Image (cartoon, grey):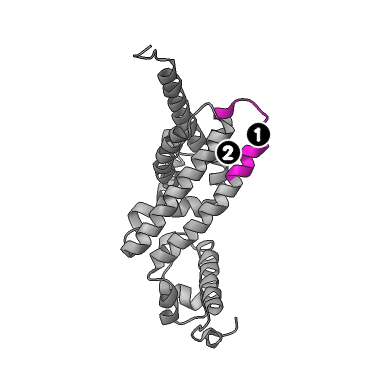
Amino acid sequence: MSDSSQFSRARSPQQKEERRRHLLDSARSLLLEIADLRDLGINELARHAQMTKSNVYRYFESSEAILLEVLVEEFAQWRAALEAGLARGRKSGAAIERIAKVFAETAAARPLLCGLISIVPSILERNISPERMLEFKRTLLSVRRESALGFHAFMPSIPAAVFETFVHHAMPMLIGLWPLSHPGEIAAKVVAASEMAPLRYDFRRDFEAGLLMLLRGLSCETLSVRAMPSLTG
C-alpha cells in the first residue's frame, strides 16, 4: 500500500472485511518484529497499516481487542497442528507420552501463540467490552472442548471430561512457563551464571515434563475410580 488514501471509508461488507483482514495481517507482522507484545499500540498499527487512527477504531475497539483476535487465529492454527501431530503417532504406543510431547512441541513452535496466552489475564482482558470478553471466553471453551475431544479420540481409555481438566490446568502452566523461559535482558544475564542453573527454564522441555506429570496423575485417578467396587454391587 503506497499511502493511506487507499483506505477511505469502506462501504460494502466485502470492503469492511478486507480492511479488517489488512489490520490483522499488519498487527501480526508487527508482533513478529517487536520484542514485547504489549508494545503494540493503535498509533503504530495505523502507521504500519497506512490507515488513520480513526479508521482502525472502526474495526477494533482497542489494541487489546486486536491482540485477542490474533490469538483466536493462533488457537485455530495450533489446533490444526496438534491434530496433525497426534495423527502421525496414532499407531505408536505410549499414548500419554505422545500427547504431552505433541502438545508441548506444537505450542513451542508458535511463539506468538504462547506470548499472547501469557499476557491474557494481565493485559489482554483489561481493556475490552463485555461483549468482546464473552465472545473470547466462548472461544476458549471451544478450544478446550475440541482439544479434549481430540485427545480422547487418540486415547479413548481416558474420558473427554478428564482431558478438559487436563487442558484447564495446562493453560496456567503455559502462562507461567513462557515468561520464565524468556526472561528479560538483565534476568537472562543473571541466570546464565552456573550457580543459577536451577532457576533456568526451557519452555518445551519443562512444559512437556509438566504436562506428562499432570496427565499421568489424571490417568491414575481415572483408573482408580473405575477400579472401585460398586456400592450397589
Residue 192, percent from left and from top: 46, 41
Residue 164 vs residue 26, the one in the foreground: 164
Closer to the camera, 177 or 224? 224
Is 159 placed above or below 36 here?
A: above
Relative to 192, does residue 185 appear above or below in the rendering? below
Q: Is mark 1 in CB contact (under 8 Å) with mark 2?
A: yes
Q: Nearer the viewer, mark 1 or mark 2?
A: 1
Residue 183 percent location from the top left of the image: 43, 48
Rendered residue at 56%/86% (across/down): 6
Q: Is residue 39 left or right of residue 76?
A: left
Q: Going by the image, does 71 lie left or right of 14? A: left
| Residue, disc 2 | 102
Q: Farthest residue in the front direction?
A: 232
Of pointers 1 and 2, the one earlier in the residue sequence: 1
227, 120: nearer the viewer = 227
Residue 101 belongs to magenta span: no
Is residue 94 highlighted in magenta? yes
Q: CA distance from mark 1 to mark 2?
A: 9 Å
Q: Which residues are magenta?
A: 82-96
Residue 137 drawn at (x, y percent): 38, 53
Q: Name the residue type under label 2.
A: Val
According to the picture, the residue beneath numbered tag 1 turns out to be 89
25 with respect to 93 (left or right): left
